[in-house]
Image (cartoon, rainbow, N blue to C red):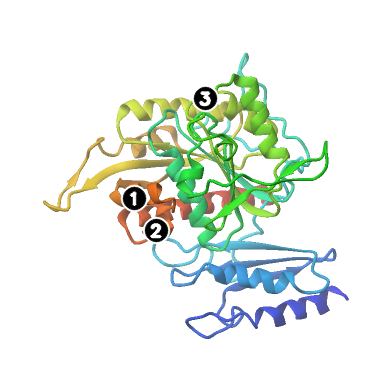
Amino acid sequence: MNQDELKQQVLAALTEVMHPHSGENVISGGHVRNLEVEGDGTVRFHFALQPQDPGALVKEARAAVEGLEGVARVKVNVQLPQAGGAAPGAGPGAGAPAGGGPRGAGGPPRAGGPPGGPQGGGGLQPGSVPAPTPKPGILSEVEHVIAVSSGKGGVGKSMVATNLAAALAREGLRVGLLDADIYGPNIPRMFGEDRRPRVTGGKGSEMIEPLEAHGVRLMSLGFLLEDEQPAIMRGPLIAGILKQFLEQVEWGPLDVMVVDMPPGTGDAQLSLVQTIDVDGAVMVTTPQAMATGDVRRGVKMFERVNTRVLGIAENMSGLFCPHCDEEIDVFGSGGGERLAREMGIPFLGRIPLDPAVRRAGDAGTPTVIASPDSPAGVALMEVAGAVFKAVREEAQEEVAL
């Protein structure tokens, strides 16, 4: 079967995928754009989501194409709706294919800014840590890797990582979440998952199957420890566990892998960026100076290892009082935005203090799923959209180069 014939079959299959509300198929409704069929059977297309569209629509479109004879793989560039309601790049022919090739493909290292640029400290300095040397083949089926980090604990980093992963999965992306916070593995509780993962394969070739909850594939040391068992280990063991989670977990094809990093600037951060090619880091802070000062150090660390900082998210930013209808700045206001402006990096948004976040975390359901219309749920969805847009723009810049 030649490419033209296969393309016609792909179009026919997509016309069978119907929008549950409008009754139109995804072709006539303008959801599918820039359809390409390559000689090796790879099918690529953009899928523009609107705010009223169910995220499952993307999965249905992908499944319809994957089921065709002659299709080897399907690459979907999902264009998430912006806060104003319009899908990013909604114009005809918008965007270049997301993903500058598979993980470990040997492309140019991502940079945190040119030396002497607005972020300051760009490029490695004498005596600093070695430059990243990602190993070919690791996570070869993962398009994008996003690290979520913070300078200090207690700012809601794991909450942001959880909801970032769940929000992207809700929009139809294939998402994995790697819990690299070895000393405080909270991802199992936040996803309501306490099973033990299965191990497959023979001796010497064992692979761990990640668990899945709320559409996200999960791996955490918390799945392997007994309740209340502390993780008492030195740096080399942390690096070894992270390496195992990257190389010996059967992640499968993913559009995005989110990595929940431990707080600080230690072994896990260095091991990650020196093992795989990271698209960028999201820094989480609370508004007060005590937190933003530590996040500043975290930003500098990622710059030193040539990893782009996608932006800063300000968590616990104001509490709406249900009794007096006033907003209370419990931890101050605007510290994250000021830090982003000073360091010349994007500000991703404010996430308010919201009881819905506590309830969702305790119940094991991410806020964007349990309470998507709550103030925190809306803010977290907007942060997720801003993060994915930044990653996609980074990939398009690399393709242009």
Residue closest to the far bottom: 23
Label 1 – label 2 distance at C-alpha: 9 Å
Label 2 Cα crowd, 10 Å radius (few <14 / some 14-19 / many 20+):
some
Q: Amino acid at mark 3?
A: Thr
For this orientation, the residue located farthest to the top is 127
In three-dimensional space, the C-alpha distance between marks 2 and 3, rounded to whole angstroms, equals 32 Å
Q: Are marks 1 and 2 in contact (CB under 8 Å)?
A: yes
Q: Position of residue 182 (x, y in %)?
A: 55, 31
Q: Secondary structure at mark 3?
A: loop
Q: Earlier in the sequence, mark 1 or mark 2?
A: 1
- Determine the residue positioned at 53% across, 33% down: 181
Quarter where residue 4 is shown:
bottom right
Q: Secondary structure at mark 2?
A: helix
* Numbered tag placed on residue 373 in the rendering: none
Label 1 packing within 10 angstroms: few (<14), some (14-19), many (20+): some
| Amino acid on which the number 1 mark rests in the picture | Arg
In the rendered image, the quadrant that contains the N terminus is bottom right
Q: Which residue is mark 3?
A: 265
Tag 2 near tag 3, CB within 8 Å: no
The relative height of residue 230 versus residue 377 in the rendered view (above or below) is above
Q: Which residue is identified by label 1?
A: 359
Q: List x then y, in percent, for residue 47.
A: 59, 68
